[in-house]
Image (cartoon, rainbow, N blue to C red):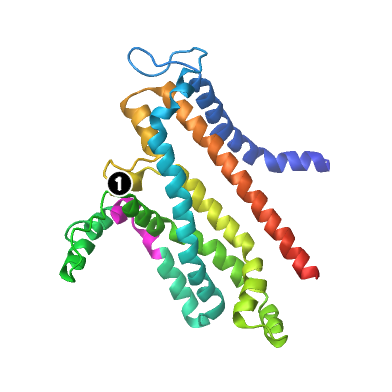
Amino acid sequence: MTERGRNIFLLAPAGAWFLVMLVIPLAVVLIFSFGERGPAGGYVPAFTLEQYANLPARWAAFKNTLILAPAGTLASLLIAYPLAYYLAVRADARWKTVLLVLVIVPFWTSILIRSYAWIFLLGGRGIPALLAMIGIEDVRLINTPFAVLIGIVYGYLPLMVFPIFVNLDRLDKRLLEASSDLGASPWRTFLQVTLPMSLPGIATGCLLVFILLMGEFLIPAILGGGKVFFVGNALVDLFLQSRNWAFGSAVAATLVVLMLGSVTAYMRLIRRLGAQREDVALM
């Protein structure tokens, strides 16, 4: 078998899976988005831009998604990075495995159950009741964007921790020692060595969390209480309740385009930062 034949043979299973599970469904959604809703719901073949012209009707869902998904990603990064740094650089080797297991533990329970637990914590008998005991009254947390943000960070934090931890764990510790020997302060060493070297892990973690958040619907439905809608909630309503498949497909296609644009811009930023990191290293 030639080299080209071997490459085709090795890539064929993944290529077939990619075609059947991603390309074809996206093509179907795109075709449906130009159709119309049938009298009894569903889809009627047509070619019209009416569904896309009606997108402003779901502006609230897009706005919430485009605000809370990046905010949740950023909040997860700010919390996950110090934790991953401690696990990879500072933690005792005897306790590192135990601490990693503790990070994974939330995944042993369904996200549905964990989200329902936050209903109690953020409800009137939870944190607001504790705040009332110290004189801070009339604080409403549940069914707000803040509650959804809390649920997002709690649910997706491990997905941000592990890529950063793996990247930092592979970091050559001699680089840190060399920076210290050359007179750099710990803070300068972090900014000029540790942080730039951990960019691949940051990029991976942010992409994992952000892409999943753009399609999230469970956490907003439970902690948002029907007042904080994501695009995922709009899609559930359009496909399963309203049975407006054409409009739902237009919303889904628009969401995919927004995700592709956001991810492309983000990757260009990461490549630019990586190029600057290499330039600094060469200097």
Q: Where is residue 22 in the image (x, y as percent from the top left)?
A: 56, 35
Image label count:
1
The answer to which quarter of the image holds residue 64 is top left
Is residue 262 inside the magenta stretch? no
From the viewer's perspective, tell me whether residue 252 is left or right of residue 267: left
Q: Residue furthest right?
A: 2
Q: Position of residue 156 (x, y in %)?
A: 43, 56
Q: Give the range drawn in magenta.
A: 105-115
Report the residue marked by disc 1. Answer: 224
Q: Where is residue 257 in the image (x, y as percent from the top left)?
A: 56, 35
Observer able to see residue 171: no
**Residue at left 44%, top 60%?**
157
**Residue at left 38%, top 19%?**
42
Q: The residue tagged with tag 1: helix, strand or loop?
A: loop
Residue 238 vs 1, above or below: the answer is above
Is residue 114 inside the magenta stretch? yes
**Residue at left 50%, top 71%?**
82
